[in-house]
Amino acid sequence: MPQTNNESEVKIPAKRRKSPRRRWKRALLLLVLLTLLILRVERNVTDVVLTLSQATARSLAI
């Protein structure tokens, strides 16, 4: 009967649980970054639309 050697078995380290506070901080940071990104894109789109509307208004004014 073969003997098993416990020391030769590979031990898988237990995953450390992330603290809830760290999770909240990460979620809050992600929310802030997404908000800033959305506002920046919206401002750029508004600038483009205003520029296009001014260009068409000038070309239509005869």
Image (spheres, rainbow, N blue to C red):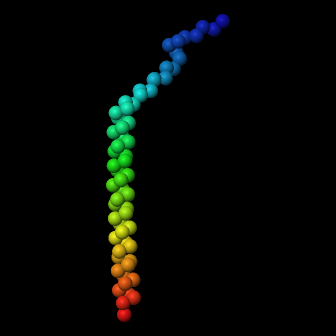
> Relative to residue 12, is residue 36 depicted above or below?
below
Quarter of the image with the N terminus in it: top right
Give whichever of 48, 12 is nearer the camera.
Answer: 48
Q: Where does residue 55 sit, x and y in percent of width and height?
A: 36, 82
Quarter of the image with the C terminus in it: bottom left
Q: Residue at x 60, y 8 (%)?
A: 3
Outermost residue to the right: 1
Outermost residue to the bottom: 62
Q: How many callouts does the rendering have? A: 0
**Res. 44 image quadrant:** bottom left
Q: Residue at x 37, y 63 (%)?
A: 42
Q: Residue at x 36, y 38 (%)?
A: 24
Outermost residue to the top: 1
Q: Residue at x 35, y 50 (%)?
A: 33
Horizontal side, residue 2 vs residue 31: left or right:
right
> Relative to residue 55, is residue 48 depicted above or below?
above
Q: Where does residue 50 sit, x and y in percent of width and height?
A: 35, 74
Q: Where does residue 12 sit, x and y in percent of width and height?
A: 49, 23
Give whichever of 30, 3 is nearer the camera.
Answer: 30
Horizontal side, residue 48 vs residue 8: left or right:
left
> Relative to residue 11, is residue 45 depicted above or below?
below
Give whichever of 1, 57 is nearer the camera.
Answer: 57
